[in-house]
Image (spheres, grey):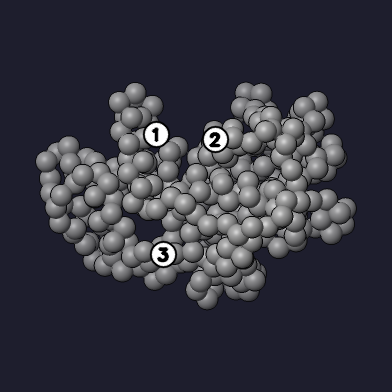
Amino acid sequence: MAANVFSLKGKRVFVAGHRGMVGAGIVRRLASEDCEVMTAGRDELDLRDQAGVRAWLSDKTPDCVILAAAKVGGILANDTYPADFLYENLVIETNVIEGAFRTGVEKLLFLGSSCIYPKMAPQPIEESSLLTGRLEPTNEWYAIAKIAGLKLCEAYRRQHGVDYISGMPTNLYGPGDNFHLENSHVIPALMRKAHEAKLAGRHELEIWGTGTPRREFLHVDDCADALVFLLETYSGDEHVNVGSGEDIPIADLARTVMSAVGLEGELIFDTSKPDGTPRKLMSGDKLAGMGWRPSITLEDGLRETYDWFVEQIETGSVRV
């Protein structure tokens, strides 16, 4: 296990983006640390407002900032609103990172996304693959903004000697996810479809393509644990991949989701739909070499996520 380079004990930690799935997971994880967690809703702080961000940071004086806030969306949203995705994410990043520097924040952790890597990067994707090829066109606007954010952290480290680092989470799932059928990611979309099939008494689940593409998934609570680990133990220019280090065929994933939901039946393949990229797996060697490993199995994580989903439906608060 890596030695501590930054102690959270007694520190004031600002989690920007605490209402998102990742930000909420980080807040849950920090509850077990001896630190003060600080959050601010949009009604209190608009991260797109440079003067407002700097004033808030100057007034609240956090010792540490975790930048989990971002404008996010699926392929359709990225394609329809490219200017919004590029501009708003650039503004959020620059306001928070520059504001942190101006107000003397001791440590900052910026969260990127696996979409920063080239579309044709060798698998598993190592951190050094960054900027070695063309991006996936469907979300390049978001990816370019995230690349700019991690490079801004690197630049501030080099020029000003501040301890700003970046983590790159893989595909995440868990409590707080978006279960909208049209713009959710693969796990919540499959889970909702399986849930509705079970309620309707159907005994099948349809998925796009052949089911052979492989994808990597990490429970959001494991991600939060890895990020706190990085915050405390890592100080370096290069970003760090945060993933499970393992991938699974989509067909096997769908069957595991069916098991978690309690849907018995057949998996149907709509081969008229595209498969997408055959494989997308990030190398976890760098993080594993520091001594961190995930602790939540996919089976356990999916069962927990489904229990949360059902609970949200019963209270009328799930995002569908």
- Kindly identify the amino acid type of the residue bearing the numbered disc 1: Arg
Please tell me which residue is depicted at 42% across the width and 69% down the height of the picture: 279
- Kindly identify the amino acid type of the residue bearing the numbered disc 3: Asp
Please tell me which residue is depicted at 83% across the width and 50% down the height of the picture: 162
Residue ID for mark 3: 247
Element type at mark 1: loop
Cα gap from disc 2 to disc 1, whole angstroms: 20 Å
Residue ID for mark 1: 319
User: Which of 29 and 95 lies nearest the eye of the viewer?
Assistant: 29
- Which dot, 2 or 1, sits closer to the camera? 2
Quadrant of the image containing the C terminus: top left
User: Which of 89 and 121 lies nearest the eye of the viewer?
Assistant: 121
Mark 2 or 1, nearer chain start: 2
Callout 3 environment at 10 Å: few (<14), some (14 to 19), or many (20+)? Answer: some
Callout 1 environment at 10 Å: few (<14), some (14 to 19), or many (20+)? Answer: few
Q: Quadrant of residue 290?
A: bottom right
Residue ID for mark 2: 28
